Amino acid sequence: MTVDLLRKLMKRYFVGFPFPEWKDMRDLDLTTLRLFVAVCEHRNLARAGEQEHIGASAISKRLAQLEAQLHAPLFERHRRGVVPTPAGEILLEHARAMLAGADRVARDMAAYRHGVKGQVRVLASVSSITESLPEDIAAFLKLPEHTQIRVDIEERTSSELVLAIRDGLAPVGVCWDAADLEGLQTRPYRSDRLSLVVPAGHPLEAAKQCRFAQTLDYEHVGLPATTAVHMMLARAAAIIGQPIHYRASVSTFDASLRCVRAGLGVAIVPREIAQPFAEDGRLGIVDLSDRWAQRRFAICFRDEAQLSPAARLLVGHLSSVDQGARVAGG
């Protein structure tokens, strides 16, 4: 967040209020912002004080100073607590981003003191983490010239990931390339194939391929509605004009495969993830013949020229892995 952006947003929603000069906004105190966020989350000064180990009266004084500094009311006081005003909601969104940035600075500097000369934060979708990304990053870090680089991986849904990269909350993301990547630069990464996983003895087990439409006669085990796979299947079912009947919804591919093994339904997951689970013969894997079942992943970032040297090295390594995989695959 820039101070100018925050000031413009507040001015848009609070016409008629006197607004602070840039120099006032520049001096926003991180400790006060942390207390402000705690009060917004708890809706209560006393509980926020317990969390932050500070008295409610001291918090109240700081918040009053913050409101005076910004020339805008940030809370509505009620008998049971406080509620952020529209101005408070605007400040809350950007205060969280500022605090997250400050925390990253602290972590990065601590890592530097311990000898890490480069640090890259990577946001990644569950599919990329469950498949090859950890191994590819580990291979990158084992190279002698990268021994003083640290890479941190955080799981996000594709939509959350893209928003975070756009907002500058992380430099690099890895997700399905069908996500809305408009405004970001990308490099190709690996690919995978969605397949139908069935319990042993299922009517479709003997087929080498099947269409997604054929799976809709059976109960499914699905992932949360926010995941890329769930949204893709929902679109495909809508086009066909048939619903997906979910018997179970779980948070990970591993959990969905265990449900299938227990006979609770069928699941659609990447073949690369399902293959190890099928080695004991208790699961069957049937490739989907639909064109959308072949997926590609993308490495995304805002501007390659603005990436740190360590981040550029990592992006180059991951994209070279993709090129090598395509050559090996013919």
Image (spheres, rainbow, N blue to C red):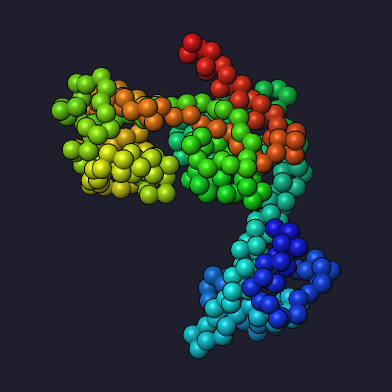
Q: Quadrant of residue 264?
A: top left
* Residue displayed at 55% across by 32% down: 298
Q: Is residue 56 visible?
A: yes
Q: Residue at 30% across / 44% down in the picture?
A: 238
Q: Nearer the viewer, residue 186 or 220?
A: 186
Residue lying farthest to the right in this orientation = 23
Residue displayed at 75% across by 35% down: 305
Circle count: 0
From the top left corner, tell me how far across and down residue 33 is, in percent. Answer: 68, 68
- Image location (x, y in percent) of residue 265: 22, 39
**Horizontal and vertical percent for residue 302?**
67, 41
Counting from the top left corner in percent of width and height, residue 240 is at 27, 39
Q: Residue furthest bottom?
A: 79
Q: Left or right: 22 with respect to 58?
A: right
The N terminus appears in which quarter of the rendering? bottom right
Q: Is residue 222 in sight in this rendering?
A: no
The vertical placement of 151 against 18, above or below, is above
Image quadrant assignment for residue 127: top left
Left or right of 205, for residue 291: right
Residue closest to the eye, 191 or 240: 240
Residue 239, placed above or below residue 44: above
- For image coordinates 66% across by 26% down, the residue present is 316
Q: Nearer the viewer, residue 195 or 231?
A: 231
